[in-house]
Amino acid sequence: MNFPYQFFIAFRYFRSKKKHSGISINTFISIAGVALGVMTLLTVLSVMSGFHEDLQGKILGANAHVIVQNYEGKIKDYQSVRDRIDSLDGIVSSSPVIYGQVMLRSGSRAAGAVVRGIDPEIEKDTTDILNRLRTGHINSLKDSGVVPGIIIGRELLRNLGLFVGDEIEMISPIGELGPLGMIPKMKKFRITGYFEAGMYEYDSTLAFINLHVAQNFFGMHDGITAVEVKIDNPYRAQEVALKIENILSLPYIARDWMQMNRNLFSALKLEKIVMFIILTLIILVASFNIVSNLIMIVIEKAREISIMKAMGATSRGVMSIFMIHGLIIGITGTATGVFGGYILCELLKTYKFINLPADVYYLSYLPVKINYFDFIVVPAAAILISFLATLYPSWQAAKLDPVEPLRYE
């Protein structure tokens, strides 16, 4: 099978005017522009996917998949509520919890915190955050003596300048009404351990105490604030939440983790789409290099084009030469960009050499997730743009009058 002459001529136009056989500088710039655009776009999309996955993992690690609450503010007979929830399909476990806003104080230092009153035996099967203890053990919360134990986040421990074993004072603004107004509740706790969730928001504001101690401290008696539910598939959380609401009915309400963090994940999704659109402009700019390069070749090769037409080459054949030439630039640049983007993503994923301020970005490093769908869509879009960039110069070459360039030969 004979190779079409258009390919031979298209490859021949890659050569520089000089005697050496290297490609021309204009062609090299065009290829580099496409490669840089593709590599940048793939790297940014992989970082955005990694940030989304990492943030989702840490949110699910610190929180239950579904939270069941009561409009009245307190769930009294929570054991029967748990039994009804556990009877549903897809439920892995459920646990009672008490949420409270408090201030933790040690000497002249103080910090606001969210305290969770939990049953240590049940909680470890519902959320994973206490499986990330750096020091101490979850069973230390079982002791509800005179000075009960408390487990706090690592950043909170640092901010208060404390160590494991030190005592800390918990203050609740909701206390008893005295002759001079509301008297805040205060109680001493001993720090028995600290955890590191890897997310600054949790590490700097979250603390855990025993469920019975929390009931006494917040005046809940035998009640709780909510029931945490873990399911077998986190992405079915919305469906399971609706089932829980149907089986419990009002005044109970069930909220899934996607609903509670909807604004955050919607912002991340929108940001990824916007970044895709903006960075695609880099490939569009590179496509103008392809256009200008092909136009220059058409001008330089006008005499050769005329000779080809005089020898019987059709306008379609001439047009295909420059379309093939432009597509080779686009495919070469795209392949180089995909390879470079993959290598850069693997380096970022393996060595984590870009550090981030955790209090600003929630994370201490730049996460990367290589999404193979992105590695299909982006190259396809780059090649399509490169193809479209070849149409006008190719059409100009095809309609060239063979008489004019040869008139004075």
Image (cartoon, grey):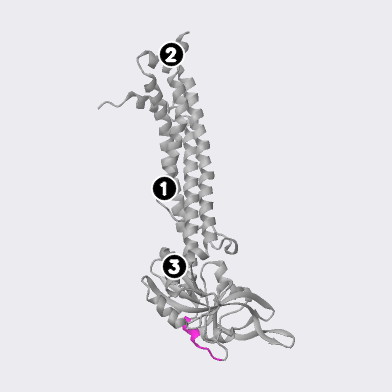
Magenta stretch containing residue 253, yes or no? no
The residue that label 2 is drawn on is: 402
Q: Read off the residue under disc 3.
A: 242
Task: Say which quadrant the C terminus sits in.
Answer: top left
Tell me the residue that label 1 is attached to. Answer: 375
Mark 2: give few (<14), some (14-19) or many (20+) Cα within 10 Å. Answer: some
Asked whether residue 297 is in view, the answer is yes
**Residue 351, image x and y in percent?**
47, 58
Amino acid identity at mark 3:
Leu
* Residue density around tag 1, few if under 14, some if 14–19, many if 20 or more, within 10 Å: some
Q: Which residues are magenta?
A: 138-145
Q: Is residue 141 magenta?
A: yes
Upstream in sequence: badge 2 or badge 1: 1
Q: How many discs mark residues in the rendered view?
A: 3
Q: Amino acid at mark 1?
A: Phe
Q: Is residue 209 left or right of residue 236?
A: right
Task: Determine the residue positioned at 44% across, 83% down.
Answer: 79
| Front residue (pair 290, 281) | 281
Furthest-left residue in this view: 1
Q: Are marks 2 and 1 in contact (CB under 8 Å)?
A: no
